[in-house]
Amino acid sequence: MRPVTCKMDFSHSSLFGYIEDLQELTIIERPVRRSLKTPEEIERLTVDEELSDIERAVYLLSSGQDIQGTSVVANLPVLMRQNPAETLRRVLPKIREVLHVAGVEMQLTAAVSFLTVLQEESVSIHTYSHSFLHIILQNLEHRDAGVSNAWLETLLAVIEALPKETVRHEILNPLVSKAQLSQTLQSRLVSCKIMGKVANKFEAHIIKREVLPLVKSLCQDVEYEVRTCMCRQLEHVARGIGTELTKTVVLPELVELARDEGSSVRLAAFETLVNLLDMFDADDRSQTVLPLVKSFCEKSFKADESILVSLSFHLGKLCNGLYGIFTPEQHLRFLEFYKKLSTLGLQQENGHNDNQLHLQTLEQEKKYISVRKNCAYNFPAMIVFVDPKNFHLELYSIFFCLCHDPEVPVRYTMAISFLEVAKLLNSDVYTIHKELVTLLQDESLEVLDALVGHLPEILELMTNGGENSGSESKLLSIPDLIPALTTAEQRAATSLKWRTHEKLLQKYACLPHIISSDQIYYRFLHRMLTIILTNNVLPVQKAAARTLCVYLRYNRKQEQRHEVIQKLIEQLGQGKSYWNRLRFLDTCEFIMELFSKSFFCKYFFLPVLELTHDPVANVRMKLCCLLPKVKSTLKIPTDKHLLQQLELCIRKLLCQEKDKDVLSIVKREQLEKEKQKNEGRSTNINDKMFEKKRRDSKASSVLAKSINLSFSGSSSGTSAGKEEKKSKLVRSQSFSTQVLHPKYSNIDKCPNKSSATGYTSSVSGMGKTCMLSFCDDSFRTHSAGNSGNAAFPSSSSRNLFNSADQKNNGNKESQSRRMSIKNRKSNS
């Protein structure tokens, strides 16, 4: 086939045609240029910047365009937080005026803003009801249904917070006129919803007197929309008035509405009956509710298919609510009805599918899919209905059909409820293992995602829940489970739904509790390493890294452990790609979380430090952020050599690092280290000072007692003989020994001269001198360290000691010394 060739015609006529085409293109562009704002429009939209927020809001609501007014209304909660008084005084009246002629967008915005002001409690509920409630009530009957519903939602929220009296006077009393047939349909619908809300606000006798007459009137309204709406509010009314009035007032209305000509009314009556089953006694349920339910079930297939979806959704609650009054025949009938609904649209007759025999509309197909989905939703309730012991006989076939349903929503619902089914079956859980494998291998990732959410719990029940099933059946269930798990992971890996893949890898961390470490090592562990090395999604890589660390944590074979550790270091930590080296740091963080400190220091500390020399700044930056955690794994003094290497690496980074971001992180870490060090030093100093003061106070008390004893002993003797003076000298030496710090108490090593001068002088002025010597302990310690003699105080201490003695003792001391010398001479 020859290629099509085109020749450009540059004749005068052709060129003229091209020019016309270009002019047409120019004409097409002109409306785009005209859509820009003119200077006049820009001037009109410009607001003085010096205006305050309140003044700007008032100006825009008064003379601005609709979009500017809508912006002010949307900003109302902010204004209420900043200046509630001025907003209520100036802005809110303007909003009230504007809303009379406002469009749909501003009305919807106002409804949301009013609700936000209520939720934020910017003003008291009294102020709110005084300022906002009337505006809400005025806009309830807006001609646009969407606007009316928006304001109604705001009002219903306000009713919850309003005082009873305000609700009664401002809302309940006007309902008497609003609920009349003469009012519009929208007004009567609004009245129905308000009835349901206020029914829980008042006591039963007030509801009976003021609310129930309006309820009955609306239940008999000529419009089926009003009857349907009021019927759905009867549940709230019944909860408000209690059991007795519900039996005498509400139940008869429900029975009448259940026979209504409108299908939507009958549907609302059926759903309300199901929701109120707990408020009816056994007689009401058997004589009134059960016949109605049977009638609903019979009509659902024959004349009224619209009720099928609702019936299938409420069937589980209905069967269990009426369980006590069912005869065996009725029990079997409802079970068969459930089975029929579970396969609706899938039955085959004479080898032909119903879809081939009866041409069904698309709407019917959607309805049947919804019915089977609801049956899947109610499956756990039906297990309770038939008793778990009868599951295999009564419901297993339906369980199989629902798990293999051709429609994804049905299988998705079964996957969500699978855990609940497994819990109910307990020891018989092994009977649904094949369906677990089926759902794990499902072609839809939505089904797999729903199942994976509770996969650890399901697998644990599968392996440990069947206590009465015997170990043999549990062991036989494992071989086909492992291929299903690997298939599920591979399908998730090849899809574009990385979040499902991430969740699955996270949940696979439970496998060490389910299967052996050898099975994990050969089927899953290396797969995790491959994902870390090859996958391009960071959350998936991190999930695989953490799961790999969990597998390594539970692997007790040293050879396998060493092999995995070596691969992590060589392929990640020393990998050519900086991305792999970053993942190595992530893996090390997980190892520090899951393993002991000694394990990390033994295998990963040095490989991590090697990355301080990495050529890529991002790797060094991530490592610097990780350094505090790395340092916390060290145990001093055992890991002192590792600490030295760490500090050496930090010093090299501080000196040689050229990247400013990395350097800033290192400096910040260093500053934090210095800060912690200083805090620790100050804490130690404070502790030492406290301990010293404690010792000083203890020694002072001992010294004071000794001094009192010495003075009492010296005053008791009146003679001044030679023997008495010698005894005093001996006591003075003993006191001096007590005064000294234990470190300096070695008095025997002191020369006699020092004892005669420094220590003999302490006898005369015993109290003050001894205290001065003791309190100067720290000073003497420092001086003794400098002199190298630990047994003597310094010369300055001795001078200070002697000068104090002289000041305190005076002439009395010199006289005693002269007398002692004369006595010695006379004796000699």
Image (tube, rainbow, N blue to C red):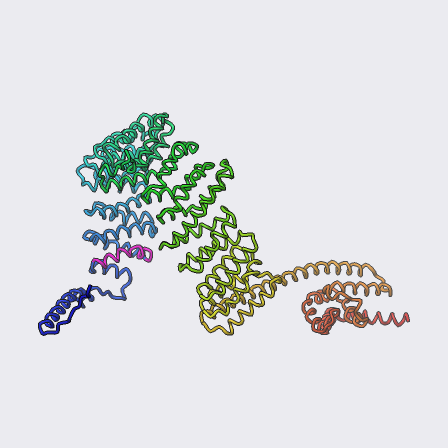
The image quarter containing residue 691 is bottom right
Location of residue 636 with respect to 101 vertically, above or below? below
Residue furthest right in the image: 828
Residue furthest left in the image: 13
Residue 521 visible in the shown view: yes
Where's residue 495, x and y in %? Answer: 36, 54
Location of residue 131 with respect to 235 vertically, above or below? below
Check the picture and name the quadrant holding the C terminus: bottom right
Check the picture and name the quadrant holding the N terminus: bottom left
Residue 70 sits inside the magenta stretch: yes
Where's residue 516, x and y in %? Answer: 51, 48
Q: 731 or 358: which is nearer to us?
A: 358
The image quarter containing residue 824 is bottom right
541 horizontally vs 114: left or right: right
Name the residue rendered at 46%, 69% in the picture: 662
Where's residue 164, x and y in %? Answer: 32, 40
Q: 114 or 734: which is nearer to us?
A: 114
**The magenta segment:** 66-82
Name the residue rendered at 83%, 72% in the picture: 818
Residue 767 visible in the shown view: no
Total number of numbered labels? 0
Q: 184 or 313: which is nearer to us?
A: 313
13 horizontally vs 674: left or right: left
